[in-house]
Image (tube, rainbow, N blue to C red):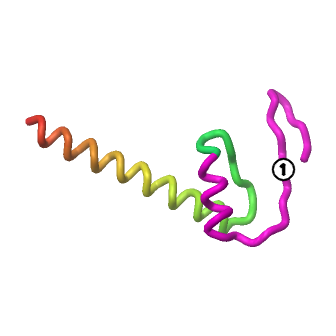
Amino acid sequence: MTALAAGEIRMTLEMGVTPDLVERVLGYGADVRVNKPETLKRKIKEAAEAVVELYEQGSLKRMKQAS
């Protein structure tokens, strides 16, 4: 673990990309950024996009119901 500017830290782990790891990283929300490996970055991005899509669809449904 390395301390960076503005209270940030860099953490390096050697482990496989598992569903549990993806869930743990997602638990940090916007307070974490994955640099490597690309497979983990892709899984985090896909999960985040799915959440956005879920909320956008929900907003569209509510807007249609209110009309």
Q: Quadrant of residue 37?
A: bottom right
Number of marks: 1
Query: From what the image shows, is residue 46 above or below residue 27?
Result: below
Q: Residue furthest left?
A: 67
Mark 1 lies on a secondary structure that is loop
Q: Which quarter of the rendered picture does the C terminus lie within?
A: top left
Was residue 19 drawn as part of the magenta stretch in this picture?
yes
Q: What percent of the width, then of the height, locates residue 9?
A: 83, 40
Who's the residue at 60% across and 41% down the image? 30
Who's the residue at 90% across and 47% down the image? 1
Amino acid type, callout 1: Met
Q: Which residues are magenta?
A: 1-27
Who's the residue at 70% across and 53% down the image? 34
Query: From what the image shows, is residue 1 above or below residue 19?
Result: above
Who's the residue at 65% across and 55% down the image? 24
Mark 1 sits on what residue? 11
Q: What percent of the width, then of the height, locates residue 18?
A: 66, 70
Q: What percent of the width, then of the height, locates residue 4?
A: 86, 36
Was residue 29 drawn as part of the magenta stretch in this picture?
no
26 to the left or right of 36: left
Q: Residue furthest top?
A: 6
The crowding category of the residue bearing disc 1, from other C-alpha atoms within 10 Å (few below 14, some 14 to 19, many at least 20), is few
Q: What percent of the width, then of the height, locates residue 49?
A: 46, 54
